[in-house]
Image: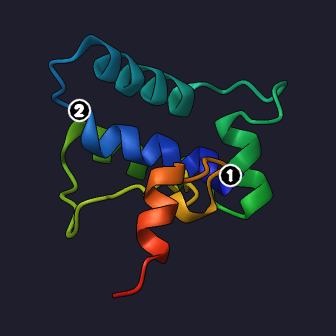
Amino acid sequence: MLAVLEDALFCLQNYRSAANAKKAGAFKQALEWIQADDRDWPFSFANICETLGFDIAAARAALIEIGRGKIARSTPVVRPARAKHRTLPRLLSRRRPSAKFSARKLKYR
């Protein structure tokens, strides 16, 4: 649940003045999610704050001020890098060296 709140914070801090329509939409969606009073959905802002033990009104007010740019952040928010796909080295691949290469490699001078 904390990850949902962190994602909203990331969108508020980094996409406030985005020229990209997708990023601007993410900012608007995060702001609307924070301002909504819906408690029917398990991942609503109010339910997440309640589960994590945060004061809903104080958290909402702080995040809205961050979204409006009134609270400056001291360090930039950076999402953790995703793990890159690992590939097998050539030595472990199924390709076999050609006969010409093998014969040349086995000659000792």
Q: Nearer the viewer, mark 2 or mark 1?
A: 2
- Image coloring type: rainbow
Mark number, residue 49? 1
Q: Nearer the viewer, residue 55 or 90?
A: 90
Q: Where is residue 24 in the image (x, y as percent from the top left)?
A: 29, 20
Residue 60 visible (yes or no)? no
Name the residue nearer the viewer: 9 or 65: 9
Residue appearing at x 23%, y 32% in the figure:
16
| Residue visible at 81% across and 26% down in the picture | 41
Closest to the observer: 48 or 98? 98
**Position of 84 relative to 43 (above/below):** below
Q: In this view, does 11 lie to the left or right of 95?
A: left
Q: Is residue 14 left or right of residue 41?
A: left
Q: Is residue 75 visible?
A: yes
Residue behind mark 2: 16
In the rendered structure, the answer to whether residue 94 lies left or right of residue 40 reads: left
Q: In what element is the residue under mark 2?
A: loop
Q: Residue 22, percent across and down?
A: 34, 16
Residue beneath the point at 29% across and 45% down: 13
Q: How many labels does the image show?
A: 2
